Amino acid sequence: MIATSFSSVDNAQISRHESPSLAPPSITSETTMNVIDRPVSAVGFARLTSAADALHALLLKRADKLEGFIEGSVEEAEFASIADALVAYEEQRWPSGNVPGGKG
């Protein structure tokens, strides 16, 4: 979870391969926050999004290098893990399936 904190990701989400939302948490009068869970400003959110996009790009590069793996190899397992992470991130980052300003 990029905009809030990893502490709010529960084991059930991890075991189901669910991606936590990238949107900042909503604030209510009943919300109690510590330093880690405080709301993220627009600038902070943009900075986190930029960092997440950079990690996304690195994972894409690694997946490209792993293409052509041998079935049953360690590379196949790594490729599958990276693919799962990329899909989960992309579903959260671009829910409509289109990148703003992109070709699709």
Image (spheres, rainbow, N blue to C red):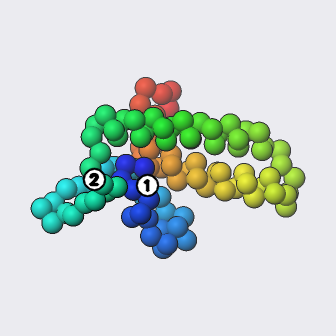
> Picture coordinates of residue 26 (x, y %)?
23, 55
Circle 2 — which element?
loop
Circle 1 — which element?
loop
Relative to 46, say whether 33 is above or below. below
> Picture coordinates of residue 78 (x, y %)?
73, 54
- The residue at 44%/59% (across/down) is 6
Q: Which residue is mark 1?
A: 1
Q: Is residue 22 left or right of residue 75?
A: left
Residue 98: in sight, yes or no? no
Name the quarter where the N terminus is drawn: bottom left
Q: Amino acid at mark 2?
A: Arg
- Packing grade of label 1 (10 A; few <14, some 14-19, many >=20) is some
Relative to 100, say whether 29 is above or below. below
Q: Is residue 46 left or right of residue 16?
A: left
Q: Amino acid at mark 1?
A: Met
Q: Nearer the viewer, residue 79 or 98?
A: 79
Q: Which residue is mark 2?
A: 38
Q: Is residue 96 left or right of residue 25?
A: right
> Picture coordinates of residue 101 (x, y %)?
43, 26
- Packing grade of label 2 (10 A; few <14, some 14-19, many >=20) is some
Q: Earlier in the sequence, mark 1 or mark 2?
A: 1
Disc 1 from disc 2: Cα separation: 13 Å
Relative to 95, say whether 16 is above or below. below
> Picture coordinates of residue 28 (x, y %)?
16, 60
